[in-house]
Image: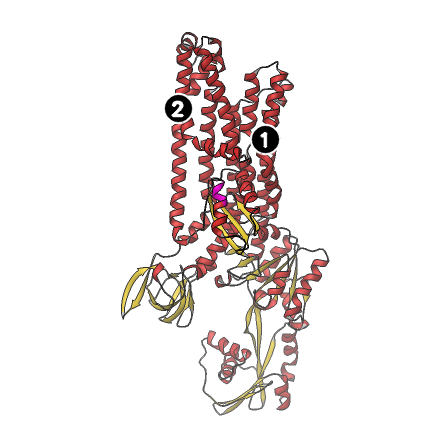
C-alpha cells in the first residue's frame, strides 16, 4: 500500500470534499481517502498495482477540481497562488457590490414609505411611468454581478448534473430561479402588463452573489491565517549556502547542496542543511527546533541542524541531510500531515455533509410547492421560500468546523515545541486519565551525575572529589566518568595518576602523589579490610534516596563518599504537579530496582511505581492499565519504549528535533521537557472544546435557519426570511466558525485552564 497527499483546488464546501471522497473511494485499489476542506488536501492510501496516482488525479479532475502532488519547490508559488486567489475574490466582491448596491437601492427605495430616501420619488416615477426601462435598468445592473460570480453556475450546475450538488449548486439554483422569474416578468411588462413591475427579483440575485463573495473573501483570509505555523516554519530555512569548492568559498542555491559538501557558516548566518561540525567552535541558537532560547555550544563532531542560527564563531560542517531529509523538513511534513488529517470527532459532520445539499434541495422544493398550493398559487411567495431555503443552507460551516481548529491547534503545538502527528492524536490526548512515564531519560536526565560529597574526619569536599576524579580519569565506567565530569564542572585540576588498575565489578585503584587511592563499592572496601563505620548511616541514607555511594579510601583508610545518581530533570516535579491538578494519575515504569524507583517517585510525586520491568514487558504493563478501563498515555524516549508507546492510547515521545519521524508516538516533545506533557494535553482539551463549539454553531445554525427560511414561523404569524438576509446569515456562519477557531492562536504554553 502507498500513502499519497494531493493538493486539491476548487472546493467550496464540505459537500465538495464528500463528493471527492465518494468518487475516489470507488476506484479499485483505494483503501482509504480523507479530504480536508480547510487544508485543501486529500490523503489517499491505495494499492499501486491496482490503480495509479495519475488515474486518481484524473478521477478528481473529472469532477471539476484541480489535483496535484505538492512539491517543495512550488511552496512559494503555492503561497503566491493563494494570495492571488484572495485578491481575485476581493476584486470580484468589489465589482459585484459596485453594481448590486445601486441595484438594491433602485429596487427598494420606491417601496420604502416610512422614510423619504433621496431620489425615491424620481425612481417611483420611472417605475410607474416607464416600467420597461426600470426593469431593463435592473437587468443591466445585475449582469456584472452574475458575470463575476460565473463560477457559482459553472461549478454548481456541473455538480448538479453529476448528481453531487454542492454549495455552489444551491447558490446557482436560487439566483437562477430569481433571475429567470424576473426575466419572465420583464417580458410580461414588455407585453403591456405593467403590474408585474412589482415582481422583479434581480436585486435578490445580485445581493446574494455579493454577500456570498464577501463571505468567501473573508473565509479565504481566515483560512490563510490558520496555516501561519507552516509559513513560519518554511520561512526559517536560508535560500543559499556557502560551500568550499576547490579550496575557495562559493555561494550556491540551497537546492544545489550535495551530501558531503563542506559548508562554511559565519556568525549571524543560518545553517542551510543538517550535518556535523568538522572545524571551529561556536554557539548555535536552536530555538526553531527545540524552543529553547539558550544557545548550544558546538565543536568538532557535534550535529547541527538546518535553519538554526550561528551566533558567535565561524565554523565548517559536512552536509549529511539535505532537502526533505533535514529535521526542519521532517517537522514541516509532520505538521502538514497533521493539519491535513481528520479527527474522529469529524466523522458525524462528514456523514451529514455528504447528504446535506440533496436534503436541502428536497426541503426547498417541498417547502416552495407547499406554500404555492397553500397560498392559492402565489408563485412569488413560493419562490421567496424556495430561494431562502437554498441560500441559507451552509455546508461550509460544517466542513470547516473541525479541520480549521485542528490546523490552528497543531500549529500552536509546533510553536511550543510540541509536534502532534494528526487529528486523532490531538483528540485522544484530551481523554487521557493516566500517564505512564519511563524513568531513565524521561523523568531523569538519563546520565549519572555527582549529587553528594561526604568526607570522613573533616577533610575538604573539593579535595576529596579532586582525588577521586584523578583516580577515575582512566576509567570507562559511567559512574567513574560522572565523577570526572563533576570535578571538571567545579573547575578542579586533575592530578597525575600512576599504576591505574580497574578491578572488575568492584572499582579502581591508582597511585596519586605517592598515595594509594581506592574508589569503588562496598565489596572492594570489605575485601581490602577498610572500615566503613564512620559513614555507615550516611551511606544507607544515600542508598535509600536512590543514589549510588562510591567509597574513597586513601592509604587504607576511608576518606569519604562521592554519591552518584541519575538526577531528576528540573521540569519533572512541576510537570507531574500540573498533571495532578488536571485530575490525571501518574505512574512510572522502570527496569531499576524497587528501592531506587521508589526514591525517584517520592521526589517528583509519582502515584504508582512499576519497577524491575524489562523493556519487552513494558507494553504488557500498559495493557493491564487499559484493562482497568483507563485511557493511558505512555511517555518515553521512543527507542526502548517503542512497544509501550505503540500500545498506549497515545504515545508521547521525549526527544530532540531529530526524532520527529518516530512512528511509535502520536506526539513528539522536541524540548525533552516534561512540562510540555501537560501543555500538550491542555492544548488538546482547548482544541476539542473549540471543535465542539464550532459543530454546535454549525449544526445549530442550520437546524434553526432552514425551518425559518421554509416559513415555519410565518405559519404562526411570524416574519418571512428575505433571501438577502438568508445570504448574509449563510456567509456569516462560515466566517464565525473560522473566527472561533482562530481564538486558539491565543493559546499559551502555560497549562492554564
Q: Nearer the viewer, residue 658 or 206?
A: 206
Q: Earlier in the sequence, mark 2 or mark 1?
A: 2
Q: Nearer the viewer, residue 597 or 64?
A: 64
Q: Position of residue 50 (x, y in %)?
A: 54, 54
- Magenta part, dominant SS: helix
Q: Where on the picture, by quarter, is residue 245?
A: bottom left
Question: Can residue 747 be seen here?
Answer: no
What label does residue 3 carry, if any? none
Give the tally of numbered discs: 2
Q: Which residue is mark 2?
A: 99
Q: Which residue is mark 1?
A: 360
Question: Can residue 551 be seen here?
Answer: yes
Q: Position of residue 17 (x, y in %)?
A: 53, 42
Q: Position of residue 445 (x, y in %)?
A: 55, 68
Residue at the spot 71% in from the left edge and 55% down from the top edge: 629
Other residues around mark 1 within 10 Å, as few (<14) / some (14–19) / many (≥20): many
SS at mark 1 in the image: helix
2 vs 1, front mark: 1
Q: Which residues are magenta?
A: 59-63
Above/below status of 243 relative to 145? below
Above/below status of 400 relative to 171? below
Residue at the spot 52% in from the left edge and 63% down from the top edge: 655
Quadrant holding the N terminus? bottom right
Q: Outermost residue, right direction?
A: 628
Instruction: Reply yes or no: does residue 744 show up in magenta.
Output: no
Q: Position of residue 519 (x, y in %)?
A: 56, 84
Separation (CA) of disc 2 from disc 1: 30 Å
Residue at the spot 60% in from the left edge and 55% down from the top edge: 578
SS at mark 2 in the image: helix
Residue at the spot 60% in from the left edge and 77% down from the top edge: 548
Other residues around mark 2 within 10 Å, as few (<14) / some (14–19) / many (≥20): many
Does 79 sit left or right of 680 as displayed? Answer: left
Amino acid at each position: 500500500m502507498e500513502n499519497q497527499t494531493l493538493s486539491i483546488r476548487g472546493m467550496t464546501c464540505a459537500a465538495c470534499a464528500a463528493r471527492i471522497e465518494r468518487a475516489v473511494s470507488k476506484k479499485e485499489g483505494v483503501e482509504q481517502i480523507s479530504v480536508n476542506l480547510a487544508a485543501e488536501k486529500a490523503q489517499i492510501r491505495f494499492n499501486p498495482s491496482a490503480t495509479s496516482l495519475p488515474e486518481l488525479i484524473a478521477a478528481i479532475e473529472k469532477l471539476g477540481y484541480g489535483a496535484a502532488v505538492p512539491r517543495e519547490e512550488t511552496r512559494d508559488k503555492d503561497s503566491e497562488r493563494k494570495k492571488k486567489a484572495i485578491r481575485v475574490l476581493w476584486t470580484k466582491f468589489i465589482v459585484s457590490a459596485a453594481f448590486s448596491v445601486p441595484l438594491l437601492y433602485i429596487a427598494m427605495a420606491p417601496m420604502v414609505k416610512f422614510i423619504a430616501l433621496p431620489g425615491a420619488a424620481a425612481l417611483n416615477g420611472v417605475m410607474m411611468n416607464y416600467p420597461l426601462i426600470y426593469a431593463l435598468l435592473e437587468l443591466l445592473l445585475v449582469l456584472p454581478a452574475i458575470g463575476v460570480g460565473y463560477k457559482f453556475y459553472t461549478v454548481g450546475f456541473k455538480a448538479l448534473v453529476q448528481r453531487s450538488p454542492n454549495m455552489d449548486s444551491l447558490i446557482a439554483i436560487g439566483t437562477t430561479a430569481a433571475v429567470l422569474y424576473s426575466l419572465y416578468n420583464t417580458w410580461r411588462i414588455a407585453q403591456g402588463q405593467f403590474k408585474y413591475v412589482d415582481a422583479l427579483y434581480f436585486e435578490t440575485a445580485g445581493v446574494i452573489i455579493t454577500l456570498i463573495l464577501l463571505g468567501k473573501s473573508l473565509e479565504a483570509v481566515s483560512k490563510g491565517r490558520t496555516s501561519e505555523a507552516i509559513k513560519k516554519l518554511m520561512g526559517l530555512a536560508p535560500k543559499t549556502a556557502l560551500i568550499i569548492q576547490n579550496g575557495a568559498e562559493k555561494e550556491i542555491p540551497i537546492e544545489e547542496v550535495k551530501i558531503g559538501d563542506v559548508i562554511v557558516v559565519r556568525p549571524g548566518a543560518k545553517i542551510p542543511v543538517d550535518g556535523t561540525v568538522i572545524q571551529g567552535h561556536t554557539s548555535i541558537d536552536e530555538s526553531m527546533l527545540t524552543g529553547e532560547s539558550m544557545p548550544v555550544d558546538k565543536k568538532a563532531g557535534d550535529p547541527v541542524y538546518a535553519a538554526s542560527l550561528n551566533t558567535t564563531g565561524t565554523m565548517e560542517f559536512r552536509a549529511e541531510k539535505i532537502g526533505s531529509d533535514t529535521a526542519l523538513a521532517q517537522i514541516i511534513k509532520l505538521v502538514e500531515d497533521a493539519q491535513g488529517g481528520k479527527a474522529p470527532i469529524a466523522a458525524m459532520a462528514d456523514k451529514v455533509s455528504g447528504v446535506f445539499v440533496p436534503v436541502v434541495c428536497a426541503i426547498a422544493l417541498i417547502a416552495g410547492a407547499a406554500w404555492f398550493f397553500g397560498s392559492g398559487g402565489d408563485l412569488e411567495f413560493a419562490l421567496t421560500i424556495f430561494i431562502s431555503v437554498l441560500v441559507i443552507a451552509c455546508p461550509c460551516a460544517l466542513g470547516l468546523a473541525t479541520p480549521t481548529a485542528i490546523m490552528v491547534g497543531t500549529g500552536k503545538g509546533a510553536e511550543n515545541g510540541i509536534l502532534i502527528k494528526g487529528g486523532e492524536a490531538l483528540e485522544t490526548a484530551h481523554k487521557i486519565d493516566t500517564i505512564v512515564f519511563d524513568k531513565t531519560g524521561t523523568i531523569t536526565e538519563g546520565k549519572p551525575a555527582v549529587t553528594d560529597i561526604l568526607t570522613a574526619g573533616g577533610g575538604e569536599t573539593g579535595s576529596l572529589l579532586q582525588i577521586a576524579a584523578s583516580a577515575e580519569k582512566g576509567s570507562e565506567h559511567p559512574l567513574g566518568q560522572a565523577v570526572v565530569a563533576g570535578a571538571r564542572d567545579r573547575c578542579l585540576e586533575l592530578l597525575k595518576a600512576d599504576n591505574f588498575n580497574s578491578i572488575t565489578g568492584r572499582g579502581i585503584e591508582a597511585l596519586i602523589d605517592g598515595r594509594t587511592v581506592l574508589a569503588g563499592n562496598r565489596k572492594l572496601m570489605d575485601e581490602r579490610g577498610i572500615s566503613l563505620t564512620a559513614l555507615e548511616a550516611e551511606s544507607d541514607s544515600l542508598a535509600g534516596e536512590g543514589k549510588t555511594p562510591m567509597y574513597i579510601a586513601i592509604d587504607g583508610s576511608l576518606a569519604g563518599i562521592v554519591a552518584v545518581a541519575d538526577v531528576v530533570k528540573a521540569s519533572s516535579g512541576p510537570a507531574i504537579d500540573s498533571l495532578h491538578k488536571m485530575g490525571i494519575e501518574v505512574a512510572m515504569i522502570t527496569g531499576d530496582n524497587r528501592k531506587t524507583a521508589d526514591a525517584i517517585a517520592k521526589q517528583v510525586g509519582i502515584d504508582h511505581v512499576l519497577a524491575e520491568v524489562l523493556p519487552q514487558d513494558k507494553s504488557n504493563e500498559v495493557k493491564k492499565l487499559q484493562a482497568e478501563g483507563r485511557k493511558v498515555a505512555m511517555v518515553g524516549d521512543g527507542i526502548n519504549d517503542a512497544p509501550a508507546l505503540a500500545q498506549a492510547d497515545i504515545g508521547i515521545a521525549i526527544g530532540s528535533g531529530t526524532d520527529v519521524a518516530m512512528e511509535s508516538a502520536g506526539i513528539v516533545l522536541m524540548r525533552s521537557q516534561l512540562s510540555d506533557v501537560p501543555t500538550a494535553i491542555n492544548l488538546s482539551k482547548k482544541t476539542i472544546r473549540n471543535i465542539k463549539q464550532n459543530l454546535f454553531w454549525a449544526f445549530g445554525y442550520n437546524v434553526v435557519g432552514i425551518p425559518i427560511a421554509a416559513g415555519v414561523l410565518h405559519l404562526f404569524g411570524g416574519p418571512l426570511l428575505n433571501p438577502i438576509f438568508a445570504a448574509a446569515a449563510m456567509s456569516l456562519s462560515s466566517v464565525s466558525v473560522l473566527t472561533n477557531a482562530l481564538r486558539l492562536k491565543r493559546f499559551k504554553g502555560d497549562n492554564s485552564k
